[in-house]
C-alpha cells in the first residue's frame, strides 16, 4: 500500500466510498446539466466538422473510402444513426459548389463550438485548478481549431489503415489442407483500431482541456474507464433503438436528431464523469478524504 501512494491506497481500501464521493461531487457540479450543454453543442458541431474534414481530405483520399470510414466509426459515437448522418453528409458533398467563403467560415465556427463548451465544462469539474490558475483566452480560442486539425489528420490515418485491414480480410490462408478466411481477423483489428483511437482521443481531452498539467497515467486511466463505460452504453443504446424504442413514432422526422442528441448526452455524461474521477483523485492528495465536495458556484453567488 505504501508504494501506491496515499490516494491510490485509500481508493483500493474502500472503492465504494470513492465512487460515492465522485458521484456526489458530479452532482454538486451539475454534471448532467454540463453534459446536456456539451451534447447540444456537439450536435451543432458534428455535421459541419465532418463536412469540412471530408472535403479537405478528399484531395488526398478517395471520397467513398472516407465516407465508409466515417460511417464505421461514427457508429461508435451515435449508435444506429450513422447511416442517416453519412447520407446527409454525402448529399452536401454532392453539391459542394454552393460553399462560399461565408459558409466556410460559418461551418468552421460551428465546428469549434463543441470543443469550447467542453473546455468550459472541464473548468467546472476542475474548478479547484481554475481557482489557482486560469488559461489565457488566446489559448482557449486556438484549442478548438487545433483539435479540428488533429481529428482531420487522425481520420486520414484511420482511413489509410482501415483500407489495409479491409484488404487483409479479403485474403485466405492455406493451413491444414483448408482455406481460412482472414475476414474475422480483419474485423477484430478494425474494432481494436477504433477502440484504441477512442482511448487516445479521450486521453488527449483529459490532458488538454482542463487548466494545468495532468499526469498522463491519470488521463489514461480516466480514458480507459470512460471508454469501457461507453462501450457498454452504446451497445445498450443500440439494443434499445432496435427493440424497445418508439422514438420514430413519437418524433417522426425529428427521430435522427433526437436519437443522436440522446447518444451524445450519454457520451458527454460519461466523459465528464471520467473527468470527475480524475478531479476527485487529485483532491484526495491535497484534501481531507472525508471532507464533503464543495459545489461549484459563480462569483455572484
Image: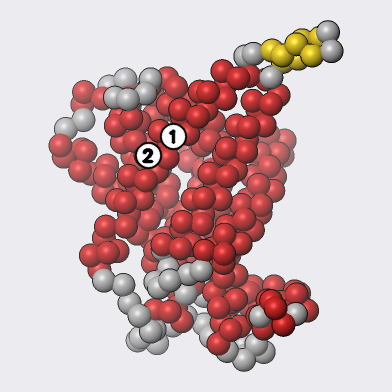
Q: Which mark, residue 153? A: 2
Quarter-of-image position of residue 9: bottom right
Q: Is residue 122 visible?
A: yes
Q: Are marks 2 and 1 in contact (CB under 8 Å)?
A: yes
Q: Left or right? Give the position of 9 relative to 59.
A: right
Screen quadrant of the N terminus: bottom right
Q: Secondary structure at mark 1?
A: helix
Quarter-of-image position of residue 243: top right
Q: Secondary structure at mark 2?
A: helix
Mark 2 burial class by Cα count in 10 Å: few <14, some 14-19, many 20+: some
- Residue 216: percent from the left, percent from the top? 52, 63
Can you identify the residue that label 1 sits on?
A: 157
Q: Residue at x 39, y 67 (%)?
A: 120
Q: Left or right? Give the position of 60 relative to 217.
A: left
Q: Is residue 132 above or below residue 138?
A: below
- Residue 181: percent from the left, percent from the top? 72, 15
Mark 1 burial class by Cα count in 10 Å: few <14, some 14-19, many 20+: few
Q: Residue at x 70, y 78 (%)?
A: 3
Q: Which mark, residue 227? A: none
Q: How far is disc 2 from disc 1 in space, using C-alphas?
A: 6 Å
Q: Nearer the viewer, residue 181 or 45?
A: 181
Q: Left or right? Give the position of 86 relative to 26.
A: left
Q: Is residue 37 visible?
A: no
Q: Residue at x 61, y 83 (%)?
A: 284
| Residue furthest right as drawn | 176
- Residue 78: percent from the left, percent from the top? 54, 41
Q: Is residue 144 above or below residue 34?
A: above
Amino acid at each position: 500500500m505504501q508504494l501506491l501512494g496515499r490516494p491510490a491506497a485509500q481508493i483500493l481500501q474502500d472503492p465504494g466510498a470513492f465512487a460515492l464521493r465522485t458521484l456526489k461531487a458530479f452532482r454538486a457540479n451539475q454534471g448532467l446539466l454540463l453534459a446536456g450543454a456539451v451534447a447540444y453543442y456537439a450536435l451543432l458541431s458534428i455535421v459541419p466538422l465532418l463536412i469540412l474534414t471530408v472535403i479537405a481530405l478528399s484531395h488526398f483520399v478517395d471520397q467513398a473510402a472516407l465516407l465508409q470510414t466515417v460511417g464505421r466509426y461514427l457508429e461508435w459515437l451515435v449508435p444506429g444513426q450513422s447511416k442517416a448522418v453519412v447520407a446527409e453528409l454525402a448529399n452536401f458533398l454532392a453539391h459542394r459548389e454552393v460553399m462560399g467563403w461565408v459558409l466556410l467560415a460559418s461551418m468552421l465556427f460551428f465546428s469549434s463550438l463543441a470543443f469550447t463548451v467542453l473546455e468550459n465544462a472541464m473548468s467546472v469539474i476542475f474548478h479547484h485548478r481554475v481557482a489557482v490558475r486560469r488559461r489565457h483566452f488566446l489559448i482557449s480560442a486556438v484549442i478548438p481549431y487545433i483539435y479540428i486539425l488533429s481529428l482531420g489528420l487522425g481520420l486520414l490515418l484511420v482511413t489509410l489503415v482501415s483500407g489495409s485491414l479491409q484488404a487483409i480480410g479479403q485474403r485466405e490462408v492455406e493451413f491444414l489442407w483448408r482455406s481460412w478466411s482472414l475476414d474475422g481477423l480483419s474485423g477484430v483489428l478494425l474494432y481494436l483500431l477504433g477502440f484504441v483511437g477512442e482511448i487516445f482521443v479521450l486521453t488527449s481531452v483529459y490532458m488538454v482541456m482542463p487548466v494545468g498539467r495532468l499526469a498522463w497515467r491519470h488521463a489514461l486511466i480516466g480514458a480507459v474507464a470512460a471508454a469501457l463505460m461507453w462501450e457498454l452504453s452504446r451497445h445498450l443504446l443500440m439494443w434499445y433503438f432496435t427493440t424497445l424504442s418508439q422514438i420514430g413514432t413519437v418524433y417522426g422526422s425529428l427521430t435522427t436528431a433526437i436519437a443522436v442528441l440522446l447518444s451524445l448526452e450519454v457520451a458527454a455524461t460519461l466523459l465528464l464523469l471520467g473527468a470527475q474521477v480524475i478531479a476527485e483523485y487529485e483532491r484526495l492528495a491535497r484534501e481531507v478524504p472525508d471532507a464533503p465536495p464543495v459545489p461549484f458556484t459563480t462569483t455572484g453567488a
